[in-house]
């Protein structure tokens, strides 16, 4: 009976730690839309979507990405928001396969994050990755000639929003 009393407080601490850990993970990538998330999706000013660090380090992306806007997806298999936007991104990739470049940076675990970091560096997306790697379900549309973020979306399943930015970027790049 004495041993049971000693185990109970430890078990409660472990349960509390596990609950806090899961809450943190779910909060980082929640499928629930809040007013803040909707505000992020509807941002219209591209200057607000680009971090100060990225704005200072704007430079052309890798040669293989030139000539087409670049859609960069920060993805993780455990992310509910990523699963929510996946059908939209697949449809866009199908529709824009010849007119846009698509890059998925997988941050599911330590190994995939390291591979994504190396891929980002190779493609000239290192600053974008550093800035957004902890924000899964984030999709950026970038100008390959400048590396500038044209639009940043978070957990946005609305295909029309992506299409509007891509169509505009394609017109501007062809000029």
Image: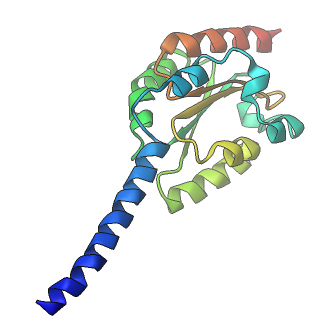
> Compared with residue 2, is residue 30 higher up or lower down, i.e. above or below?
above
Residue 57 occupies which quadrant of the picture? top right
Residue farthest toward the right in the current orientation of the protein: 56
Residue at 83% from the left image edge and 37% from the top image edge: 52
Residue 133: x and y in percent read 61, 47
x, y percent for residue 73:
56, 35
Left/right of residue 163 with respect to residue 174 in the rendered view: left
Dividing the picture into quadrants, the one containing residue 166 is top right
52 or 88, which lies in front?
52
Q: What quarter of the picture does the N terminus occupy?
A: bottom left
Q: Position of residue 150 (x, y in %)?
A: 73, 22
Q: Say left or right for 110 vs 152.
A: left
Which quarter of the picture shows residue 161? top right
Does 175 appear above or below 140?
A: above
Q: Quadrant of the C terminus?
A: top right
Residue 171 in the image: state x and y as whole percent: 74, 8
Q: For this view, does 129 lie left or right of residue 105?
A: right
Q: Residue at x 57, y 34 (%)?
A: 138
């Amino acid at each position: 009976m004495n041993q049971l009393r000693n185990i109970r407080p430890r078990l409660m601490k472990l349960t509390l730690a596990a609950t806090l850990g899961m809450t943190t993970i779910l909060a980082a990538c929640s499928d629930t839309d809040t007013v803040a998330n909707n505000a992020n999706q509807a941002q219209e000013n591209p200057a607000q979507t680009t971090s100060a660090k990225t704005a200072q380090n704007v430079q052309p992306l890798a040669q293989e990405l030139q000539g087409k806007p670049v859609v960069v997806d920060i993805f993780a298999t455990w992310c509910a928001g990523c699963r929510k936007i996946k059908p939209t991104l697949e449809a866009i990739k199908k529709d824009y396969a010849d007119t846009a470049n698509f890059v998925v940076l997988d941050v599911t675990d330590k190994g995939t994050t390291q591979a994504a970091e190396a891929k980002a560096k190779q493609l000239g997306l290192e600053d974008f990755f550093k800035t957004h790697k902890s924000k899964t379900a984030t999709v950026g549309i970038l100008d390959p000639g400048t590396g500038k973020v044209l639009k940043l979306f978070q957990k946005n399943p609305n295909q029309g929003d992506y299409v509007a930015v891509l169509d505009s970027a394609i017109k501007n790049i062809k000029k």
